[in-house]
Amino acid sequence: MTDQIGKTLVIGGGISGIRASLDLAQAGYQVLLLEQSDRVGGLLSQLDTQFPTSTCGMCRMLPMMERDRVDQQCLRRGLSHDNIEICVSTDLISLKGDPGNFSVSFLSQTDGGRDDCPVLVVDDEKIVRDSMKEWLSEEGYPVQTADSAAEALNLLAEGSFKVMLTDIKMPGMDGVTLLTRAKEIQPDLAVVMMTAYAAVDTAVEAMKQGALDYLVKPFDPDAVLQMVDRIFKDAVAENARKDTVDAVILASGATFFQPNLGINPYGYGRIPGVVTNLEFERMLSHAGPGGMDLVHPVTGRPVTRIAWFQCVGSRDIQTGTPFCSSTCCMISVKQSLLAKTMYPQVTEACVFYMDLRTWGKASDDYARQAKKAGVRFVRARVHSLAPGLKENDTGIPVVWLDPSGDRRESLFDLVVLAPGQHPDAFLSGFAKDQELTTDDWGFVRPEPFLSGHTNRPGIFVCGGATGPRDIHDSVTGASAAALSAMQVMASAGRQTVQNPEKTESTGLRSDGVSLFPGALVIGGGIAGMAAALAIADQGFDVDLVEKTDHLGGNLVWLQTAIEGAGSFLEEQTAAVQGHDRIRIHTRTCVADTMGRPGQWNTRLTPVKDTAENTDADRPEQLAENGSPPDKSSGGKSPDVQVRHGVVVLAVGGAEASPDRPLPDNGPGIYTQQQFQQALDQDAIDTGSPLHVAMFQCQGSREPGRDYCSRICCPRSLDQALRLKAGHPDSRVVIFYRDMMTPGLSESAYTEARKAGVVFVPYEPGNTPELAADNTGCRVNWTDPILGRAMEMAADYAVLATGIQPGLSRDLARLFGADLDRSGFFDQADIKWRPVEAMDPRVLACGICLEPGNLALTLASARAAAAKAVSLLSRETFFPGKDTARVRSAFCSLCQICIDACPFNARFIDPETRTLKVDPLACQGCGICAAACPSGAAVVTDRSLAPMIKTIHAVLNQPL
Amino acid sequence: MTQTVMEPEQDSPPKTPSLNPDAFEPVAVAFVCNWCTYTAADLAGTSRLTYPDNVRLVRVMCTGMVDPQYVIKAFLEGADAVLVSGCHPGDCHYINGNYKARRRIKLLKQILPRFGIDAQRLRLTWIGASDGIEFAQTMTRFVEEIRGLGPCQARLQQVI
Amino acid sequence: MDYLYYPGCSLEGTAKEYDISCRALFEALEDRLTEIPDWTCCGATAAQCVDPFLSVVLPARNLALAEKTDTGLDVLVPCSACYLNLKKARQDLWENNALRAQVNQVLEEDGLAVNASVRVRHLLDVLTRDGAVDRVAQLSENRMKGLVIAPYYGCQCLRPYVEFDDPEQPRSMDALIRATGADVLAWDMGAVCCGASTATTKPQVGKELVGRILDQAKTAHAVVTVCPMCQMNLERFQSRSVPVVYLPQFLGLSLGMPAESLGCGMNLSDIRPVLSRVAP
Amino acid sequence: MHLTDIREKLAARPDLTRQLAQVKEQVATCIQCGTCSGSCPNAGFMDMTPRRMWRAVLTDRVDMVFSSQTFMLCASCYVCTLRCPRGLPLTGAMAELKQVAFGLNLDRFKRSTLFYKAFMDNIRQYGRVRETEMMARYFLAVKDPRVPMSYTGMGIKLMAKHKLHPHLPTWGPGRLAPLFDRAKQQER
Amino acid sequence: MIASIQTKDHSITRTLQDFFAGMLKTGAADAVLVPSRMSDSPYVKPCLIASHDRLDRTVPLGPGFFVNAGPMMSRLTRTRAGSTLVAWLRPCEIRAFVELTKLRQGAREEVVIIGMDCPMALSRTDYDDWAGQGNDMSDDVEKWIQTVYQKPVTQVDAWPVSRACQVCDAPYPVNADVSVMLLGGDLDREIALRADTEKGEKLLAEMDLSEGQEPERRKALLADLETERTEAFQAMDEEMLDQTGSIESLNRFFSACVNCYNCRSVCPVCYCKECVFNTDAVAYAPTQYLSWADKWGQVSLPNDTVFFHLTRLAHIGCTCVGCGQCTLACPSHIPVSDLFISVTRNARKAFDYVPGRDDAEPLPLSVFQESEFTDIVGMGNKEAT
């Protein structure tokens, strides 16, 4: 079946599902997208805006090339792509098989839903009947109850049931006899016995007489639901649709914690002014319940004072969720900023937090905007709404202790809870059926160093199912998962749908454009290697350029710090060096490039030996008369010309140098990298009790470098734990502004505290002073909680300075990309197109794209590779029907349209001195047509002639 | 969606609007961006919001595509008002189309009022994908204001 | 259902009426209460500070006595403090075999040995979960109609051992009160601390905490308690007279039992307004 | 209470030092979120809030720990234990601090120590508490007339409600004496 | 630095002619662009002169202004010629050329622009009377020069100066390499030249002229000119407002227009190779005309007259340099420049943009700010969304 078109099953139509499906469809593979709810978009269809830009940009996920194969409309109105078959309101019935041959059966809820699977519950205890009825009807099953066997029998006589749950020990007729009598009336009735712990053997006995299974009291709702679900699915299995696919991507997402479960200290559901942040999102929206204005959900009075409570159902052992849900802080920052700016009536916006986790690239600056807009951030966790002071008409009373211990109280009209995320029922059921390894909270645990892979080959995972994720991580992870699926289909020899245009239209279309085959990857660190390998594995040539003489970049010094990284680095290096499609150019950098995007002809030149040219990847300036720099250095291989259609920038970065001068006579002062290397080379005797002070956010999250580098806090915790393991009496004090351990890395923070590490928070204004002399370092600070001046002598002081990107503006500009405010690669959209420049053929990954740990670096590398592969695997691209054209006869080459085009799709062809359009970059928006006075720039039906007809027709319609 | 169901084709010539103001029914053109305002219009429809149908929508891919000539032609074609509506700043699918439109409308608002076309007759609004209610309100308020202004001078002077 | 009964020292002294009403109520409900023979003090808050080991031995002694009756009955404890001490000892002894061995060496002096298998239950746990509600409903004939009652639970019967009710918003007394025909005051001070022992050593603590609780109970005819310490504090720090009765007293009255048989004369607070409102 | 002499007192009592270390371990993973202080009904009366107490314990500031009233004001209402997001046994830790403080028999807690001693002697003698005799012995031990005066009001009220049973004191071996002695032996 | 040329035998024209000749002789300039008469006719047009002995028919200063040299300069500098060109341009010609360079229609690297205080211009018909048969024009020219530079005038003898010049808000050289300061100068004795850029200095240095200084009365005269011209503009603006206050009156204003599009072809900043009104975009189908006739009752032909002028107004809304050529070129004598100058001067105020003022100032519609003009967004003009 070699000519068969590759097909992938994507489970879940949220952000990750859409992104993975679009990547695969763009590469020409077919996708079967299953979604349980009645629409595609998942959480996104309820959000008008997203952090960190307060704008909405979901439609920017749509492919930029071959746009005609997708409906060009806002994704909240639906998604359609020729290669994607979307089934909404559809349940996955069963999934079996292995890579290249998964058989999946699925059923739309409309033709065989749960409503025609009635359930009969028989039990003498009222409390059992009521709870079972509530659980099951919530899932959509019609439920009837009987308090005795006799009543059950006449119910069975009247109506037909598919499932019967019966107690055994009941007054009058017992469950087992009821079982046999029921079977006589309805032979195909599935019967489940409900038994107390003691009577299990009778239940087993009943199974011999036809009972399907048994449940043990006290019942856990999930167990009951899963049992009945399984019976329902088997019952409807025969009229379910069947299909075979090559790979599976699980993108079923996660659900939000329900604040009213458990102790419910905030009276959610009882006090109307207490809402979740999703409900508040709807209140903020003009299409929400409050319409154009922000009013109290019950009293209808305008809301002027709003409080946000963070960590509701996160970082809280009482609710079984000790991890951090990583997105709630930023959601509250966005909502508080929007509340203050969209509704001037809001006078008081106050966020109560423990650590404000703004670890995304632009998140910290976004939080600063909120502060500037007047949002108050209080570092205190409000225990509950003050009991006894009920919500009266003046507002909800909130009491808290600020860090210095003073009791504060104030009234708020609205309290917005920021609930955490945790796995949903579908995920736990699916993970159990498919035997996926999950972590102790129920999220699917991805394989180390292989983002997106699970322990089952052929089944990949991304988005909320792998842990609490924000949109940026979900989108990056989804593309990485798509790449893994492509690898499975490639190894199974599957084909892609090449050019439908060719088949439909009679003759061959002549206006196709194709990219030069092959990719150029700049930077031989782990990101560059991962991207190069992934692209080469799909059968495309790759040129890997590295300015030093070895591969591995930062991972070389980091490998001992991360478990398993050493062997992983060796494998990758060997694979890259051994790969027949990868050409490695060490001690080489990019000189310059000719040609249009997608048809580049780049000249690589050896790096000059002089040590001082640190910025070797800055292309040398062409000699005055345009000839390349002389190559008199002899012996070196001459320049190499490389043709490629896609470029991946992976030049990495380095640890930022501390902004304040290191006291020179302080032997004990290290940066985080130096301390790690000292630890790895045993230059520090961790066996003896040491006193170490660690300083976070040194130079980062301040004007000039206003982003969080995301890796320093976890690194400090790792080093602190290593010191503590070395000797329990060593004293480690970490001075921090906000501990950035989002998601599941929160456990390291708890471990460190358990090991006795002392954490001292400080505000940007009063950083602890560090003085050093030859005896050692001395730190003094005022402890914000004790309110006392404290002092500490430290053998070592470690400054966490964070990441400095290593991408030069000239190299980025060479390929039409640019740097952002902080010096990282300027992504097309930080959330929706994280690894691409405005031109989809220019990609980036690793820490020159954004600060992040090894996992994120590998995910972005594989995401970039996915984009590259989906472009390179297309033989020819056919420009969309509404692509700009130039009528050269009217064009006076004034270049107004070149400046106007947001996608630099227009250029002057040097030979013919005429203006040309790059059909692959042009998005058909028509901005050039409006800018051009003479109508030389035309986009099919978007120019003067057709528009005049439209205007005339429109104004001529009778009223 | 936004148009009332078309009445059956009458054979009588289209009634040229008479002069007296209370029978005056304004006619307006709205250039709406495909991604945001058109979606809001669709949302207004699916939310069963009602608003006068005097405004005829012309869907454009982006407000950046609205050439000043279209606005001038619309007025000369007899439109009593022209509305250009697109995405909020930052939401534009084509990154900065809406900013460019804002400058072109500003230029037109300096020129057209000199020829008796009141600046209020040319409006630029940001209406996001979820602002269904705002779209309906904008339409209603827009038609009321134009009805207040009376027929546009251009319309009465049979000149193309 | 029958129970072993552990009154505790305060039910012999300052909370005498709690003991009297308990016994009378269970008699009316046809449940037998057999007092644990030769029971001694559970150590209250003093033992903990003076001698931590003794604070386990004292309650263990009573558990051993209860097991010695080998009736397999649960131990019913009206006083929340005693309930917590006995419960804590029972849990520690059940989980820590070394501790149990040590304690048994001491109990040998009195010829006793503790196995920590007996179940310790609070009065309210028994009244809510063993079917008392239906019986009260039949026998009370809505005698308490028209009364609004504020159920006050205190702390140690709800926390830290969560056995029979929500530790933050308890609701278990509602059914009992409604069974008597009375209405339940909608308030959420039911589980807020009255200051317990700190109210005696620091009066201003008691004044403020109790003040805040009673302030919420303004619209109720009476406050019903299930702990002698709470009862004492709620009665001592009253800025204006609020009738405070024990739950068994209230239930007893609702069954038509005469006030004296329930020790109604001994309450520190003036409960006559409640007595007069009870229909014959 | 100066830092150095507290440290000396502690050094002299290894059992108490061990108990204090145990408390330190119990509250090690405290993330200073302030939930316990916010929930505590008596926080308003404490000179040092529970949150600050755990901070002092973790940073070995024993001077601040034992010069504060915090654990004397703990009503053991267990709300903090219920709500602590880190699941720490806070009420138990507070009780243990109280035990250590009494173990050190600092004179700041003299009055409470005498009250508890009177209470325990009463139990040792009669097996059950006899309030009148127990309070009488306590007033004698305190040797401060103002203390009995503050209780007379309540005493009269209780007498009126004949809630104070007029037992006469008896001498001779205490009902629980053997148990108490054996327990004392057991401990060493 | 400021230099001066000694006037030879009371003829400023001849002095300037020698000045240019000297430039060509010394090779300071490979060619000079100066307005010159065609054969012996009175009409003057910009002429590219490379040999020093062909300057005798040039009329550097005079009322004849029938071609704005801006587009001519763009033709001469579309690509690099490898030569130095000296251009003698009026202020509105400099402005037009600078705008064209912004539209990449020309470049000024190889050009040295000599700008002069503007001698103003006569309308075509008045010029015919003034020049007569043009055989003995030279003393009329000298007389014109002497009168226009002594004090602000709006007419010389009986002939009124063209309306565009009367309202011109910048009749002095701006953004030029060399500025010739004639206003208020003792022109019989000398002409003062000021070098504004290095190129200007280099040119004057090569001519080794003597030291000079700006005529003292010039500043005062410029101020008078400013106030006088502003009042004239106000008057014209009001005139235009009531003449074209509505589309109907606009249509009457252009009722004589026959869509010959002359005004467009002479306009220096209307740079399109092919105007959209010449393309098929407006080649309507016959059914369209009938549909219009059906709707409006009548259609005047050729149509799109008002549409054309309004479109042109929008296209050059900010770049019109107010040179007045459109009025001079209109066969139907429609005062087109009065309308365009009054509309565009108001329109460009909104963007704080002056055409030609600065090479680096981007065209207003090619740039934007993230948040600007919030007043025009939203339903109520005041409330901004």
Image: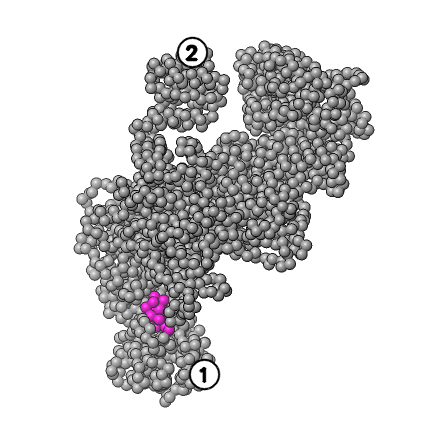
Asked whether, in this view, residue A887 is left or right of residue D170, the answer is left
Q: Residues within 10 Å of mark 1 (few under 14, many from 20)?
A: some
Q: Residues within 10 Å of mark 2 (few under 14, many from 20)?
A: few
Quadrant in which the C terminus of chain A is drawn: top left
Please tell me which residue lies in front, A411 or A269.
A269
Element under disc 2: loop
Res. E212 mark: 1
Compared to residue E356, the image places residue B123 above or below, namely above
Cβ atoms at labels 1 and 2 below 8 Å apart: no
Q: Which residue is mark 2?
A: A173
- Would you identify the image quadrant in which residue C81 lies? top right
| Residue beneath the point at 42% across and 70% down | A632
Question: Where does the image place residue C96, in percent across and percent down from the top left?
Answer: 63, 26
Rendered residue at 38%/44% (across/down):
A484
Instruction: Give the Cα separation between the discs numbered 1 and 2.
Output: 127 Å
Q: Chain of mark 2?
A: A
The image position of residue D11, as x and y in percent, is 74, 38
Query: Do callouts 1 and 2 point to residues on the same chain?
Result: no
Left or right for C98, reference A871: right
User: Is label 1 in a helix, a strand or a loop?
Assistant: loop
B73 lies above or below D26: below
Report if residue A691 lies within the magenta region: no
Query: The disc labelled 1 sits on which kind of residue?
Result: Gly
Q: Position of residue A234 (x, y in %)?
A: 35, 26
Q: Chain of mark 1?
A: E
Q: Quadrant of residue A77?
A: top left
Foreground: A20 or B68? A20
The residue located at (51%, 50%) in the rendering is A558
Q: Nearer the viewer, mark 1 or mark 2?
A: 2
